[in-house]
Amino acid sequence: MAGTRLIQWLNLLVWALVMLKTEGANVSITIVKDAVAKGAVCLDGSPPAYHWDKGFGAGINNWLVHIEGGGWCNNVTLCLNRSETRLGSSKHMDKAVNFTGILSRVQNYNPDFYNWNRIKIRYCDGASFTGDVEAVDPDTNLHFRGARIWPAVIEDLLSKGMKDAKNAFLSGNSAGGLASILHCDSFRALIPSGAKVKCLSDAGYFINVKDISGARHIEEFYSQVVATHGSAKNLPSSCTSKIKPELCFFPQNVAHEIKTP
Ligand SMILES: *[C@@H]1O[C@H](CO)[C@@H](O)[C@H](O)[C@H]1NC(C)=O
Ligand SMILES: *[C@@H]1O[C@H](CO)[C@@H](O)[C@H](O)[C@H]1NC(C)=O
Ligand SMILES: *[C@@H]1O[C@H](CO)[C@@H](O)[C@H](O)[C@H]1NC(C)=O
Ligand SMILES: *[C@@H]1O[C@H](CO)[C@@H](O)[C@H](O)[C@H]1NC(C)=O
């Protein structure tokens, strides 16, 4: 009896090691279930999520929060499509991911941050966490609520220990890099005042120019993103009070107002 148990356990252990070896990915997902009560949900209504690799040694009270990228959805058709993918639903996200680059825990690859608490916030709203529409379309069940996800996830991280942060660093890539610009000062405001806070945008400075056909495609695209997601009220009012809200989705019109380094 005990022998059978042991063999079962050994089988499980071997299976787990094989999975780890073949999958490699080993930073597991945290689903922020509490966020649902606040209406802070992904496009399909599922809870938001992040991955957290704990800090160690001298980095134990330092926190690097990285926002995943993945473009934007500018209308119901494309947002509906996205809601059936990892970029629109935590139901479709990998349960564990590899942490590489600025998220790596290997000192040689990431000498400045390897021992910090490193977090990857999963991108699942399609508008760089700016949307907030109360109504849910009964036909599609789409939720445009990214702006609610942002504080809900940060508050969850504060409760996990980020409230004691000595250093907090917001970063993000692509659509997440834009989010790190748009949310830099609100990140500062959510972190206790004793902490040193900075932000970094990696490939998130999208410029408002004509494309090679001579059309202002990106401006038109952003105006549809902002309209679909109800983003205007969550973009910096110092900008929206002066120019059209979609123009305030461009870093060139908002970055100079950021107070946090
Ligand atoms: C994670 O990294 C390992 C080792 O480099 C690699 O074999 C694996 O394919 C990666 N997994 C994913 C999901 O990217
Ligand atoms: C995850 O895998 C990498 C590469 O194999 C390893 O260096 C790291 O220590 C692992 N992380 C955890 C949390 O086990
Ligand atoms: C949605 O946006 C895409 C990309 O801009 C466009 O090709 C498509 O025609 C739009 N669909 C609707 C229904 O507006
Ligand atoms: C819809 O999503 C799938 C992935 O689920 C993707 O392959 C396809 O290109 C998307 N369609 C459009 C019109 O974007």
Image: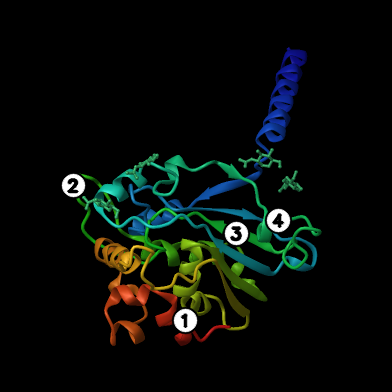
**Residue at horizontal 33 percent and vertical 76 percent from the top:** 247
Mark 1 vs mark 4, CA separation in Å? 28 Å
Q: Where residue 66 sits: x, y (%)?
A: 57, 62
Between marks 4 and 2 in the image, the one whose residue lies nearer the viewer: 4
The amino acid beneath tag 4 is Ser
| Screen quadrant of the N terminus | top right
Q: Nearer the viewer, residue 218 or 78?
A: 218
Residue 119 marker: 3
* Residue at numbered disc 2: 138
Say whether residue 259 is left or right of residue 34: right
Q: Quadrant of ligand 4?
A: top left
Pointer 4 and pointer 2: residues touching (CB < 8 Å)? no
Q: Nearer the viewer, mark 3 or mark 4?
A: 4
- Distance from disc 1 to disc 3, alpha carbons, whole Å, reads 24 Å
Name the residue beneath numbered marker 4.
104
Label 3 and label 2: CA atoms lie apart by: 34 Å
Give the CA separation, mark 1 to mark 2. Answer: 37 Å
**In x, y percent, where is residue 58?**
79, 68
Q: With respect to residue 79, does 168 lie above or below?
A: below
